[in-house]
Image: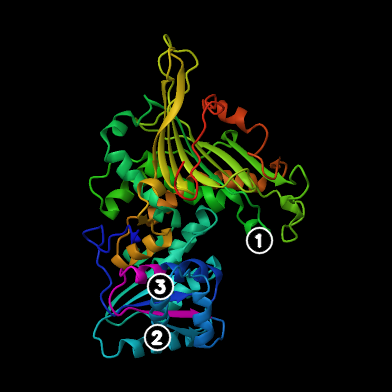
Amino acid sequence: MAETIIANPKAANTGAVSLPAGSIIVVLGASGDLAKKKTYPALFGLYRYGLMPKDIKIVGYARTKMSEEDYHKRISQYIKLPNETVETQLKEFIAMCTYVSGQYDQDEGFQSLTAHMKEIEGSKKECHRLFYMALPPNVFTTVAQHIKRNCYPESGSARIIIEKPFGHDLASSRELQASLQPIWTEDEIFRIDHYLGKEMVKNILILRFGNEFFGASWNKNHISSVQITFKEKFGTEGRGGYFDQFGIIRDVMQNHLLQVLTMIAMERPVSFSAEDIRDEKVRVLKAMPIIDPKNVVIGQYDKSPDGTKPAYTDDDTVPKGSRCPTFAAIVLHINNDRWDGVPFILKAGKALDSAKVEVRVQFKDVTSGIFKDIPRNELVIRIQPDESVYLKMNTKMPGLTTKTSVTELDLTYNRRFSDLKIPEAYEALILDAINGDHSNFVRDDELDASWKIFTPLLHYLDENTDIVPAPYPYGSRGPAFLDDFLASYGYAREGVGMYQWPVTHANGNL
């Protein structure tokens, strides 16, 4: 079947302004891994499906000195080419891309970048530029200042995309914001959290507010708990030195998983405009108290039982005796009328038994009487891999008894939408930035509120050297006492053994 992308080239926010024809996208850090593996493939995806503004140009900027031919080889090596037509499109895309080399802390390089852009723009009266900072956070402020001083158009507009991490605690986040805001306005800044670009995360608002049967039961009266899980099968694999600076809580939970939580818990926005959506997310965050260390489990992966997989501290890049958590389970609460008393469980870890990201909404037990030990209903939103939504429900087993069986109402995307391509998260978010739509980007007060929730816990763990993460075997579900911890907050796994999730084969058949 013909491949089609699920995307709307028009901005969803009616107040947003799209970049006009002839605009320039500048990729700063163009020689780095993020640019090669994510940014350029996403830009090519948008070009391939005709979602770029007409006559747009892409300029790479980095410290690496290289010829344009070498630059083109670098940016094309991670772009997949399923057929000859796409190969032709790639050649066209490459022809749009040029490169400028320069330092990140010197005006001269940015002045050369501006001269190059002016050469591309010619005699245009208004120039429009989008700067994508695919850079490490230690140079965010320096580069942002040099761009504003040297590369901001005299007439027209500029936008800047900033990658996470946005600081490592509340103080550093505020310091970063304070350094940006005098030179860049909030409507010019796009703080990118790629989880907000994932198809199933964007679908949460439609599932919740576009279906009355969910809306009626989406509260403390019907829901027992909400669990948001992030699992990776691999460890740090030689990148432990980088990971050790952050740990699993900073790396995944304070940003990605908390963003998903706000989408699950927020009230209905008055519209789909960016500010109405982000207002509701901020209200949820402000209703959440700081995390009590008693509601936290941390772990660090050890060797696999057969000894073939190393422990976290076996990684030569990891500091000796590191207490960095590679696993955490955290219970948060929301003090409002809808969610009072409902535990929201964030769970994330590396070197676990499977790779997946999902939301599991567990409903309360049915009234006892005619039923005994019947499993709870669960709504599961699988974010990755194999995007799906399924509702686990009880039904009568066929036959001459009233025995129940757990089954599912199943929406698996690769079966239901087999002729459609789900866009990559970075494709969706870069398109939003081109369209000027902030809906799926993090606002400054949202960032501030999220760090307020997590910072006391992070400082507590950093400062108390007697707190050591519980070891768990590489390839396991996590620390041995995890199930007891979750059960203490009312989460039930009693239906797990009697439920078999259908396996989807490569051809889409069961």
Q: Which mark is residue 114?
A: 2
Mark found first going from the N terminus, 2 or 3 = 3
Residue type (three-letter) at the residue carrying disc 1: Arg
Q: Residues within 10 Å of mark 2 (few under 14, many from 20)?
A: some
Q: Which mark is residue 86?
A: 3
Q: Position of residue 356 (x, y in %)?
A: 53, 46
Q: Residue furthest left?
A: 14
Query: The magenta stretch spans which residues?
Result: 43-62
Residue nearest the observer in this picture, 456 or 446: 446
Residue drawn where x is 75% and y is 60% of the image: 316
User: Which type of secondary structure does the marked residue at label 1 adopt?
Assistant: loop
Question: Is 16 rendered above or below residue 419?
Answer: below
Image quarter of residue 151? bottom left
Q: How many marks?
A: 3
Mark found first going from the N terminus, 2 or 1 = 2
Residue type (three-letter) at the residue carrying disc 3: Val
Report how far apart the C-alphas of labels 2 and 3 lie in the structure.
32 Å
Q: Is residue 53 magenta?
A: yes
Q: Is residue 235 magenta?
A: no
User: Which type of secondary structure does the marked residue at label 2 adopt?
Assistant: helix
Mark found first going from the N terminus, 3 or 1 = 3
Give the residue number, with chain letter if any, for mark 1.
239
